[in-house]
Image (tube, rainbow, N blue to C red):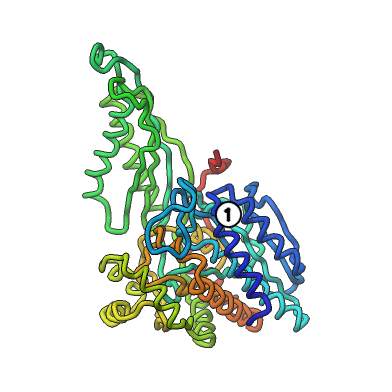
Amino acid sequence: MDKYNDELIKLAKNIWEFAEIKWKEYKSVEAQKEILKKYGFKIKENLADLPTAFSAEFGDEGGINIGILGEFDALSGLSQVEDLAERKEKVKGECGHGCGHHLLGTASIGASLKIKDYIEKNNLKAKVIYFGCPAEEGGSGKAFMAKAGCFDVADIAITWHPFTGNAIFTGSLQANKQVYVRFRGKGAHAAASPHLGRSALDGLELVNIGVQFLREHMQDFERIHYSIIDPGSASPNVVQPYAEGLYLIRSKNTEYVNRLYERFKKIVEGAGLMTETEPEIIFDKACSNVIPNSIIEEELYKAFLEEGPVEFTEEEINYARKFRETYPQENIESENTIGFAEDKNAELNYLKENILYDKILDYKHSNEIVMGSSDVGDCSNVIPTAQIITACFAIGTAGHSWQEVAQGKSSIAMKGMLKAADVMARAAISFIENPELVKKAKEELIKVRGEKFISPIPDGLKPRMA
């Protein structure tokens, strides 16, 4: 057993219990800072004026500065009883860790501690910096941190994500922009005087109809999602004077997101004209596409091979089988590792035949777009960045599902978390030992990105935390 394992497992399970939503991860942050302070890290709080963003540094100037990214926010409405293979809320209406961020930040702290030990033991001029990044789910905390220059102090960044397989996460992720759309109209009696009313809800619904028609004319790598967060009055006999929706617009990079956004704005304007209501668009958040970095990916792959895959017991396989039985076949056919595999049919057959992932997927660098977004993209636009995934859940477990929450405190999840810490630390040490690799990684980033990072967040805007 590694000397930190017990503390890391306890930390992950505590954060699972806290299950705090974006921008409100106060208990999770304090628990992380406590263990980092204990081992000599210097804490910087309120990064980018975000109350739950912080960094923890160990080491001296003059060498390579390794950044390790951590997350710790949960998802709304996903409270779930642990280890139970049926849907049952633990606390009605509360949050749950349906994306494994209780594991994500904890393993990143574990890697930071191991890198600290290496620096200390060898008396090196080097530094490890753990970045505590809030609100990945729907808040894009790293995007605000990147705009504020928080990641500029590191030379490279390494991170990971809990998944159902063991692989290098290669390829890009979509950039996005999220906005609130509000309509203001005129209330009236829907039966006696409908002609006096101007329905804000009609305006919002016409936006959705317009978006549906726009989908036919978007490119394959583009998406628009929405949620009606305020339909106005709960009474159907009222012409609704107010309505509000939240829209998430995705494309392959910030430039393409902005193009799609301009088309979206015309739909909103048109809906206002058709209903004689007043529309308003309010920026919420945005994040950049991920720029994959082959230099860091290759070192992570070497480290993964040296550490070996996660190993599971028969008892753990039987535990995972209970959850596997709750998934349809299409869950297996939609696994992330299929997208990373060269031989997709062979990978699919492996996934069908196994309950838990017990190999390391062969690595080949890719620049292809993976559907989905992460604010890791903004960090990857500032400094060279790469990440791995490790097996923490039964094959077929969907992200943002109650099944993932239920498995979040299991020995399977803890093993995957600890493996991620070992792999990240080993790869980071290779960059400290070989500074020329850092130079190559930076050259690759500039070649792909260009000379300057342009943040997708407008100047002066802060995230909405209410």
Whether 314 is drawn above or below 78: the answer is below
Q: Quadrant of the N terminus?
A: bottom right
Q: Is residue 388 above or below residue 216?
A: below
In this orientation, does residue 126 appear?
yes
Vertical arrangement, residue 197 with respect to residue 43, above or below: above
Q: Is residue 342 visible?
A: no
Q: Which one is nearer the viewer's eye here, 166 or 328?
A: 328
Amino acid type of the residue tagged 1 in the rendering: Phe
Residue for point 37% across, 48% down:
249
Q: Position of residue 302 (x, y in %)?
A: 51, 85
- Judging by the rendered image, the residue that carries numbered circle 1 is 18
Neighbours of disc 1 within 10 Å: few (<14), some (14-19), many (20+): many
Q: Residue 317 location, x and y as percent?
A: 41, 78
- Tell me if 207 is positioned left or right of 439 in this view: left
Q: Secondary structure at mark 1?
A: helix
Quadrant of residue 80 within the rendered picture: bottom left
> Which residue is depicted at the point 32% across and 74% down?
338
- Report x, y in % for residue 392: 46, 72
Residue at point 64% right, 48% down? 51
Which sits in the foreground, 321 or 160? 321
- For the C terminus, the quadrant is top right
Residue extending farthest to the bottom is 306
Is 281 positioned to the left or the right of 427 in the image?
A: left
Residue 415 position in % (x across, y down)? 52, 76
Query: Number of callouts in the render?
Result: 1
Which image quadrant for residue 126?
Answer: bottom right
